[in-house]
Amino acid sequence: MQLNYIANTAVPSATGLTLPVVDPSYGQPFDELQRSDARDIDAAVQAAHTCFKGPWASLSAVERGRLLMRLSQRVAQCTDELAALEQRDCGKPTTQARADATALARYFEFYAGACDKLTGQTLPYQNGYTVLTWREPHGVTGHIIPWNYPMQIFGRSVGGALAAGNVCVVKPSEDACLSLLRVAALAAEVGFPPGAINIVTGLGHEVGDALARHPGIDHISFTGSPNVGTLIAQVAAQRHCPVTLELGGKSPQIIFADADLDAAVPVVINAIVQNAGQTCSAGSRVLIEQPIYEPLLQRLGEAFSRLRVGPAAMNLDVGPLIRASQQQRVWDFLSDAQVAGIPMVAQGQVVDEAPQGGYYQAPTLLRDVPSAHRLAQDEVFGPVLSAMAFEGEDHAVELANATRFGLVAGIWTRDGGRQLRMARRVQSGQVFINNYGAGGGVELPFGGVKSSGHGREKGFEALYGFTSLKTVAIRHG
Ligand code: NAD
């Protein structure tokens, strides 16, 4: 039985209720977690405030950095254990689960080093004045985390918030809590004071909503779907609480005829099948210049049909989806494609060993997807790639920007001028030229434009969002 983690103590919820923890590879429950409510959030916020005013305030920036570095090292020692938890909880193939645990350690390492480098400025002003700016923590930051990359998103969000001097109350997804509860215990082990990291589990509309509404939460970092992001922003606006929103995407991979296709093909495939396509920055649309449309589709199709899907522990190309409703969502998109007459180029194979109850979906490549169709507009959040042809740069830009999202774009061309023109014209928070995702990019600011959200996480830039700027004007004559 999993318990909440408040003030360095594992505690049951005030509700006495639990939720099942289901293994997506089998569709079977194997554990339980707390179905908390507003009372548990309140307890976590109280613990965080006590910590913020007490032991946390007494730490210098360099001491905070050392704590984060110790946590990074402890997480690295526990890579196997954390990866195994995440694998069973979220259905991640071993390679992905280990990569996520490694990234978590790396986030803490990066933010450990950043703690004592966050500085203000001295501003030129009228004679007789000295004007300073200080970056101050918000206080207690609330973190609402989705199920697709719990460790990575916890690392970037909580790591940045702690580095900037905040303390945290975290609401993981009800589908992905196990690794984060363990990380909170590891933080206590390495010396984080009680209340610095608190985790309360439960359902979004119950405990997530209570977190967003709590007057003791001074900043909210939300990663999840656009619909829930809108709800959070509305709730937070009522008390003018600052919010960072990391929402979804419908990210294009734009491939010009002069591109290095040998380099592009494996990256384009990985960008849609990694984590079974359940990635906010998945390259879910491939825009291909007309002269290479047919030959490239053929190559992509051959690669798709070789992809194998199975239980997480088999460590194949693709694991299961997170839950039955996600599987149904992907099926709905594919049946819409069939009704609209959108041709399927190729599908991967679910292996015979895949257990009956698991949530498996073969990766699917579709072609000639009309730009207005929901397959080209909405997140499937599954391993489904929509291909469409374009003619020339203007058309590529028009298609790339024709969704409400703007998270990431990939541009594949050998032409240097075109690389820069395209990078300027696509509407997205990140642009990758002749690569995609850049290996995770802990150091690289990440976030969206349009309905992909606002604010930035990752990198040093995130620290500005986790602080508020105070201007101090001293008149000394
Ligand atoms: P979701 O929006 O359903 O849930 C995200 C979190 O919000 C969960 O912890 C959930 O319990 C909570 N929640 C749900 N309803 C709530 C409410 N009314 N009030 C407060 N909290 C609530 O998203 P999901 O299905 O867990 O994750 C998938 C989505 O997340 C996709 O849209 C994906 O693109 C997005 N995502 C974005 C990024 C990014 O950085 N841009 C990263 C990962 C995932």
Image (cartoon, grey):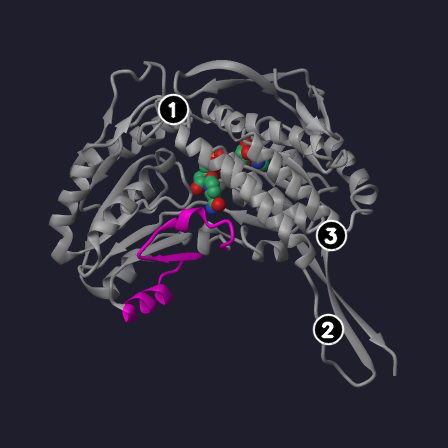
Residue of label 2: 122
Locate the N terminus and report the quarter of the image it occupies.
Answer: top right
156 lies left or right of 130: left
Q: Residue at x 58, y 38 (%)?
A: 144
- Against 142, residue 183 (above or below) is above
Name the foreground residue: 329 vs 113: 113
Q: Amino acid at mark 1?
A: Ala
Locate the C terminus and report the quarter of the image it occupies.
Answer: bottom right
Find the magenta span and give its range: 416-444
Tag of residue 312? 1
Q: Residue at x 19, y 42 (%)?
A: 300
Tell me residue 468's x, y (percent).
69, 58
Mark 3 residue crowding within 10 angstroms, few (<14) / some (14–19) / many (20+): many
65 lies left or right of 311: right
Q: Amino acid at mark 3?
A: Ala
Name the foreground residue: 100 vs 380: 100
Residue of label 3: 61
Circles 1 and 2 in contact, beta carbons < 8 Å: no
- Against 262, residue 11 (above or below) is above
Determine if residue 225 is in view: no
Tally of numbered discs: 3
Whichever of labels 1 and 3 marks the residue nearer the N terminus, that label is 3
Name the foreground residue: 67 vs 408: 67
Tag 1 secondary structure: helix
Instruction: Indicate which label's residue lies in the foreground, 1 or 3.
Output: 3
- Against 143, residue 306 (above or below) is above
Q: Amino acid at mark 2?
A: Thr
Q: Residue at x 53, y 35 (%)?
A: 151
